[in-house]
Amino acid sequence: MKNDGWRDYLNPVVRDMPPSGIRRFFDLASEMAGVISLGVGEPDFVTPWHVREACIWALEKGYTMYTSNQGLPELRNEIARNLAGRSGLQYDTQKEILVTVGSSEALDLALRAVVVPGDEVVIPEPCYVSYGPVSQFSGGVPVYVPTSVADNFQVTAARVEKALSPRSKVLVLCYPNNPTGAVMEKKNLWELAELAQARDLIVVSDEIYDNLVYGAPHTPLAAIPGMRDRTILINGLSKAYAMTGWRLGYAAGNPAFIEAMTKIHQYTMLCAPITAQMAAIEALKSGGAAVARMVGQYDRRRRLVVRSFNDMGLYCFEPKGAFYAFPDVSATGLTSEEFAERLLLEEKVAVVPGGAFGPSGQGFVRCAYAASMEDLSEALKRIARFVRRVSSGRPGREPLAAGR
């Protein structure tokens, strides 16, 4: 048998799944010297020392064993306390909170727990690249709902309703949003909540960026009356606490959902690493000041990036959350993919083409401003140089003017 013949043995859903568009550019950048990467959504900050120290202490004391499947009771208590303090949400630490290996596992567990083959999973886009594939791995059918810069990349209840069918079961939301940085206005959120209740939808709400907001308050969907028990809230410590490599996330929701998710977790992952859990306890107890400092730095970078893109003549929607800018590069005459690939090869700056996040991302690129001010400033100089060169080389076209 030829080597390629073994592909016939693969699950066709997995076999035919395209690789992540984010990782492609990250891998390309990693093979080149002198690249400034604005591609991967990872803080440039090191995990705060007192959090690392908690991990070191745990190792020195011999904490190298399994924990309960749901996670350390003290960590679940801190998660519950944190949610109650910031949003007023009350969760039973014994039945309604599950500690996971990153928020990505929580998303996978949530969809596998509630989706049966043929169920439709409604996903506003542009969206994080895993939502559609994970829905398909669960046997679900992703149904994408477009958003646009005209709506500040906020999905509306009217658009979601048009996408619904008798097979619609789950609505996936991510606000603050990756890749656009949009934050949902309370009016739109309430209308979505009313629609979810009227059409009996389960909502998986990915709120991993909830701490990273800039003058636009975040409202958890589960805090809206009638939504707590039909919402699976997903969160983690990767982004706000600069703990991406620790792989520590969690889910909160009604006992039926959490019990089902825990069953899958028991048979596949067992538990999150105990050292990461010990560090997470310290982060949630005492990490507020460090988070505030990091958010302040992200805000400075955010303003620099948005201003710089607009000055280049590439209109940039102002992100109100997360740490991504999503400039419109269509004025260069290049597709998102052409822009990203040429920018990487010619100027050694890595960004992600917007099409990786869905059809509504075509014409945009995602730039993570979770990089140092020094790297950001240099990257923006290189991008401006590239834009001028591309603009001046277009037949019969004037160089791009500043602003939109």
Image: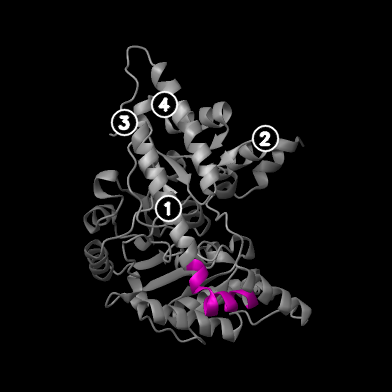
What residue did someone put label 1 on?
300
Residue occupied by mark 2: 33
Q: Position of residue 158 (x, y in %)?
A: 21, 55
Q: Which residue is disc 4 drawn over? A: 334
- Secondary structure at badge 4 equals loop
> Mark 2: which amino acid?
Ala
Q: Earlier in the sequence, mark 1 or mark 4?
A: 1
- The CA distance from mark 3 to mark 4 is 18 Å
3D distance between C-alphas at marks 2 and 4: 25 Å
Q: In terms of image quadrants, where is residue 332? A: top left
Q: Which mark is residue 402?
A: 3
**C-alpha separation, residue under disc 3 versus residue under disc 1:** 21 Å
Question: Nearest the camera: 47 or 219?
Answer: 47
**Left or right of 58 in this view: 177:** left
Magenta segment, which residues?
278-291
x, y percent for residue 88 = 35, 81
2 or 4: tag closer to the N-terminus: 2
Classify 132 as above or below 94: above
Q: Can see residue 329?
A: yes
- In this view, the residue farthest toward the top is 396
* Nearest to N terminus: mark 2 or mark 1: 2
> Disc 1 residue type?
Arg
Query: Which numbered tag is attached to residue 345?
Result: none
Secondary element at image label 1? helix
Q: Amino acid at mark 4?
A: Leu
Q: Secondary structure at mark 2?
A: loop
Q: Which callout, 3 or 2, points to the residue nearer the camera?
A: 3
Assign the N terminus to one quadrant of the image. top right
Task: Check disc 3 and give the amino acid type.
Answer: Ala
Residue found 46% across the figure and 83% down from its top: 81
Q: Residue at x 32, y 45 (%)?
A: 317
Query: Which numbered disc, 3 or 4, marks the residue closer to the eye?
Result: 3
